[in-house]
Image (cartoon, grey):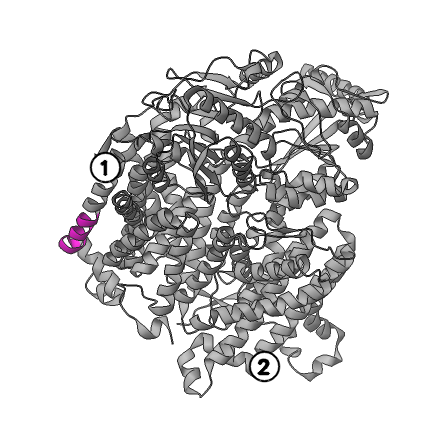
Amino acid sequence: MFVGTILYAIINSFILIMMAIGFNLTFGISGVANFAFGALYVLSAYGSWILLNLLKMPYLLSVTISILLTSLFGGLIYRLILLRVRGQALSEVIATFGIGLSILELFSYFGLVGFEYTLPVFIDHSFIIFGTYVDAQRLIIAAVGLVLVSSLWLFTHHTSIGLAFRGIAQDERTALTFGIASDRIATLSVSLGAGLAAVAATIIIPLGSIAPAEGYDVLIKALAVCIIGGLGSSGGVIVAGFVIGFAERFTDTYIGSHWTMIISLTAILLVLVIKPSGLFGKQKELEERI
Amino acid sequence: MKLHARLLAFLFVILLVCPVWSAIGNAQEPIVIGIPTSLGFLEGKESLSAVEMAVDEINAAGGVRVGSSKRSFKVESIDLRDAAPGVPVPEALLGLEKIILEKKPAALVVGPFRSEALMAGMDIIAKYKVPLLGTIAMSPGSEKKIKEEPAKYKYVFRTCLNAVHLVKFLAGAMGLINKEFGFNKVYVMHQDVAWARATAELVKSLYFDKNGWTVLGLESYPTGTSDFSSALMKVRSLGAQVIMPIFDMPQSGTLVKQWNAMKVPAILSGFISPLAGSAAWETFDGKIGGATNTIFELGSGIGSGKVPPSKDFFDKYLKKYGKEIQAGHGPAPSYESVYILKEAIERAGSLDPDSIVAELEKTDRIGVLGRVKFDEGHQAVYGFNPQESCVSTVFQWTDSGQRVIVFPETIAEGKIQLPKGLKSLK
Amino acid sequence: MKKRKERIDRGIKARSGDVFTLCSWREMLYLAAPRLLPIIVFLLLPPLLSVYWQKVLLSLAVFALLSISWDLLSQSGMISLGQALFFGMGAYLSGIADHYFGLSPLVAIPLASFLGGAICTLALLPVLRLRGIYFSMVTLVIPLMLVRIIEATRIFGGTEGLTGMTPFPSKWIELYLVITVLLCLLFGFRRMMASDYGLVLKGICDNDRSVTNAGINIYWFKAQALFMASTVGAFSGAFMTHVYLFAGMPVFALDYSILPIAAAVVGGPGSFAGATLGAAILVPLSELLRGIGGLRIVFYGIFLVVFIVALPEGIFHYARRKYHQFERWVEVEK
């Protein structure tokens, strides 16, 4: 029971990290809090579903197309809309939230709700680990999570675009003087964030089903992980993912499922009150409180 | 020139016909049936289709006789969105008020999803005096209000199952499992909404506690929960033989998937909305053999050969819309409600709400659901015999993907089978 | 030949700038019209509307109040993403006062407003030091948490909520009560922000550190602004409880946080009048779109995005500029 809970807590942590990493990347680089993030997650899932079931494309192809289209869509959101309100945090939040709202409600208008809207699992098999049954899909999530986190680290530390990303994140004006086009990088960052949402959807959705309500859920979870870890901090996301992931599973097992959400929300509040920049965010004393 | 002449002739004919048309129109202004519900959800959508089907049938057969004139029915719907998470009840109620005030319906059918919205909406219905034949919201709380203040709330009826009657069927299915396989350890999981909570607690106090069952756990889950691993691990370690889930949210399908993936050695028997329809077999890749599920009203989601109208209704729906009913709750009582309403209006001979209500109370009709009669809480009575009352059904998925009705005995089509991998204690 | 746009005050604006305006009806009207217009519209409209549109006017006024409350906070440097907190607090308190203690609405509403305002202020006192997005996140999280706590502990009716409230004696009292409160607060707050007191609040928003340098305790001022704003929010919640005769978990719904912000943004923040105007556009629009069912929210979202991009200053500021000034093309001097 205890070992089983730990096992599922680890998997849950990876699910949370996968959900949050795209949001965090976008915010960390371009400072855009993409409130359409949950909608992009759902959008790519429906995209895959439509390609797979209505156009009868092979699985790999439809998933790839859907991930690429979602990234493209993310880039377009930045180019066409966010560019015009760049730097005004509130306007950015409202604009992205409006986009997200439209996408999600459009899907529920078309009645794409129900358990038949789901994506297939990769391998249909269950393993016994320390006496607990775990299905292959969950193990794949953990593996993909690891690969994704490490390849992102490699990408931002060892490629020129990745370095440009970090440059913009550190100081936009100085980066400009080095010839890094800030708008181009910001477009890429929003698009990459959207792509990561799509990847997360592709591997997480098979556990459950696609539903518009999922979009709001993913957004809240991503926010929770990012706030606790520190907005924009990659290491923080991983630690916070594990903190919330373990807290959720253990409260579910030993206290009651009602308290899972309360525990993570309390954690957010505490972090905000005590150390607003999060566990691993850079301390910006006078910017965050006075 | 020729074209011109034709056009003129055409216009002339129209001018002649128009006044005649409008004269007919005035004499037979259609009776409006309002459908305020959550149209974005499966149960709401299929209920609306079922109502439209009933209305088309009635209109094709000549309409409704009100006093001396024949009038047709007309359907007006509005999306309340009350089932969607985060939608405030007042916003849903504004929709209810809008359809009452703008479309002037003679009666409402289907109604809100959430019992919370229905309870708050009853005051609005009482204010405008429009009869409501509810077919989705299930909490017995509304009946209590009707019994307390009948003069005020008498306009609210319910033709679908309520939580109290559902208990009888869940208990019946449990009794069957106990009789056939000797299982008596159960783990109850329910969604944290009024009707599901009431149902779970009633099954425990009225059945499990009195019949020697051990309830190993009774856990509630907030709407939207999508990880049930902790509960399933508990089920395994405590050695439960039966899991009784009571959920109406789409995410509850995850429970079925996890139950599969974690190979939990317990039979799944209760109500999970995604398991009700025929499409579930494909959705869950055929891995639900042995699971039993409840269909709230006969005719929604499944029809029985032993009650011909239910089979008829199910087949007619398939023919008209090209797909089977997937919702296990809503469509059949919605269809039936239109007929109940028609008969009440014909008996009352007018559209006066109070006389319609008086006639609705006297309803005694055999149809899709079995025999519909309302009790003093304006709830259709559900029992085990379609000749005496409305019936719900419990069916079991066979290993070949068929749904076999196993309970109640009066309409059963087969015996309950032991799922693969489980050992009978008998 | 290059041209640029020149913006010049209208003559009448220049003339009505001082005491001589009293000499001419036309100039007096020019000054009074924008102020009289909302008063006349709000007071005369109700009897002309159908019952349903009266309900819409009611929810318009409630959202306008929430939006004004948001605007007051934002002008004092606090961006709230959780107006639902104030709304829900008022709704529940009034519901409790009615349901458990049987108080009449006319006692329960003021009580719930002030008590709700006090509770919200005390609850947010520890985070008053937070700035910008961090304060916003706290306000976003608290209502979400309160809902879950009510659900888990099943206090105050749990998921079913409290029903069976006492309604207002008549719908006219109901309607004119909220309209009167709205008009008083609209003009009252506008005057307040124009006074020295308002100047301090605006100063905190613009540069809190220099206000501190002037020897002013900014936390005390922020707390006061917070109390005023949350009392207004709590009033709208308490009022709605007695209109819908219901208080339950949905009163903390996201709608009550999002719509007021949207209204303020569409109407133009920083003037209260913009917030009211925004609510007066968005609420009826949302009702008109109800006919198309679920698509309504889709259009709503698109509308918001278009507005943010195309007219970021908001309708009110745009209209005011057009009222006072005219524009013309002039040649650019070499």
The percent position of residue B137, horizontal first and vertical second, equals 60, 36
Q: Give the labeled residue for mark 2.
A: C195
- Depth order, front residue of B238/B154: B238
Q: Amino acid at mark 1?
A: Gly
Determine the chain carrying the residue at label 1. A
SS at circle 1: loop
Q: Is residue B114 magenta?
A: no
User: Secondary structure beneath disc 2?
Assistant: loop
- Residue B7 found in image quarter: top right
Range shown magenta = A149-160
How far apart are labels 1 and 2 at the CA level?
A: 72 Å
Image-based side of B221 in relation to B8, left or right: left
Tell me if residue A80 can be seen.
no
Give a yes or no on whether discs 1 and 2 share a subunit. no
Measured along the vertical axis of the image, is residue C76 above or below residue C166? below
- Residue A131: which numbered mark, if any? 1
Task: Give x and y (percent) for residue A115.
Answer: 42, 31
* Amino acid at dot 2: Ser
Q: Is there any visible trace of residue C298 in the rendered image?
A: yes
The mark tally for this picture is 2
Relative to A128, B200 lies left or right: right
Which tag is nearer the camera, tag 1 or tag 2? 1
